[in-house]
Amino acid sequence: MPASAGDALDEESAWALLLALARRAGRGDPIVRDVALRLRDDGSLEEDGADAWIVARPSTERGWSRYEGAPIGRELELLFDLYMPLCVGADRDALTIAHLAQTLDGRVAVASGESQFITGEEDLLHCHRLRALCDVVVVGRRTVEADDPLLTTRRCAGPSPVRAVIDPERRLGEAHRVFQDDSGATLLLSATGAVRNGARHGRAEVVSLDAIDGRLSVQAIVAELRRRGLRRIYVEGGGLTVSRFLEAGALARLQVTVAPTVFGSGRPSFTLPDVQALSQAVKLRWRHLALGRDVLFDCEVGR
Ligand SMILES: NC(=O)c1ccc[n+]([C@@H]2O[C@H](COP(=O)([O-])OP(=O)(O)OC[C@H]3O[C@@H](n4cnc5c(N)ncnc54)[C@H](OP(=O)(O)O)[C@@H]3O)[C@@H](O)[C@H]2O)c1
């Protein structure tokens, strides 16, 4: 391994490599064995070539190792540590991941709904990177109401995902940016019957799903998205929506970035059925990483 090949790996090319791995996983063809990798100038992946940058290792928690003799620096190590486990391995082609930014006391917003921004720049960049690595970003009605988000990738290179808003009763107005922006597709996931007002909501396509007591089945949401080829699903919030995916056992990975601040009131990160004993708590395998002044808990769910 010539040192020059290691030197050639800068943050831009490392990120482009990760995007290529995610795209490959999204096509149903994830890396499932140790492969030495490099990105060609045309953006395609070169596997087991002479000038590899790194080795993808689906068999380890880290998901990668440095190619022998090629120092890449702390920043790139962190980049690969954070994203490689989301891109390689047999179960990465149909990944469902959620992320929340919360206070030390477990709040994702103050009572009025204001939440921008609880965590710092590094975590915001991380959220945009998660969008770029996934096929679809899912949010709940109250997030659109409070934040009027665009849900595109503006802080990093990479494609914007399809947007899916869960609004069972179609309470949201059509003027929200996510329903008017024409830079990408938006789906409005509503309850059967709410489609009576038309098959479109602004520029968004209305998708009707069966609801029981006003709730759409998370399994039905996931199945509908996958049926449309949207295999890598990123649930961006808010707390109720992430909680419903967690409760349904639909998350492979849960990421919570904790900011060193306390609200003492406000909207909670998690709302789940009562547990009566510690033994009933959700079990997670986790690791933590520093993201600027914040700490990211990166958890595997139900393994
Ligand atoms: N800190 C962060 O990481 C972060 C991220 C995103 C948003 N936020 C903030 O979080 C707040 C919103 O969070 P939230 O927990 O209050 O609400 P939310 O999760 O944004 O939206 C919840 C609503 O979405 C609908 N919904 C979600 N899943 C559903 C399902 N399976 N079936 C039927 N309906 C479903 C329901 O709408 P109906 O009520 O119409 O039934 C539900 O009340 C906002 O203030 C926003 O700024 C923070």
Image (cartoon, rainbow, N blue to C red):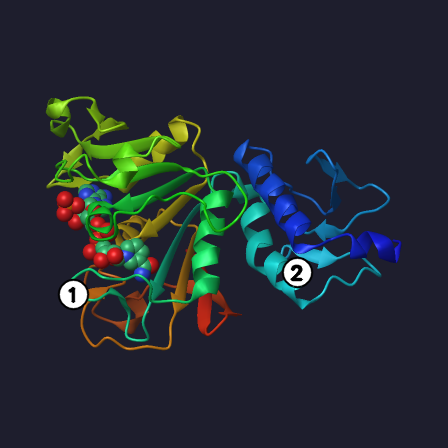
Q: Nearer the viewer, residue 34 or 47?
A: 47
Asked if 28 appears above or below 61 in the picture, the reply is above
Would you call the spot at circle 1 few (<14 residues within 10 Å), some (14-19), or many (20 or more)? few
Asked if 124 appears above or below 135 in the picture, the reply is below
Q: Nearer the viewer, residue 8 or 233?
A: 8
As drawn, the label of residue 111 is 1
Is 143 left or right of 32, judged from the image as shown?
A: left
Q: Which residue is mark 2?
A: 76
**How far from the left and from the top, in percent, is residue 249?**
34, 49
Whichever of callouts 1 and 2 sits on the residue coming sooner in the sequence is 2
Q: Nearer the viewer, residue 233 or 133?
A: 133
Q: Give the residue furthest to the right.
A: 2
**Which residue corresponds to the image point at 36% horizontal and 32% vertical from the top-left?**
225
Is 70 left or right of 106, judged from the image as shown?
A: right
**Which residue corresponds to the image point at 15% horizontal and 28% vertical from the top-left?**
192
Marks 1 and 2: CB-CB under 8 Å?
no
Figure quadrant of residue 35: top right
**How far from the left and from the top, in percent, is residue 129?**
49, 50
From this viewpoint, is residue 61 visible?
Answer: no
From this viewpoint, is residue 25 visible?
Answer: yes
* Label 2 CB sits under 8 Å from any ligand 1 atom: no
Q: Secondary structure at mark 2?
A: helix
Figure quadrant of residue 255: bottom left
Would you call the spot at circle 2 few (<14 residues within 10 Å), some (14-19), or many (20 or more)? some
**Callout 1, which amino acid?**
Ala
**Which residue corresponds to the image point at 43% horizontal and 58% vertical from the top-left?**
124
Asked if 63 appears above or below 194 in the picture, the reply is below
**How far from the left and from the top, in percent, is residue 105?**
28, 75
**Callout 2, which amino acid?**
Leu
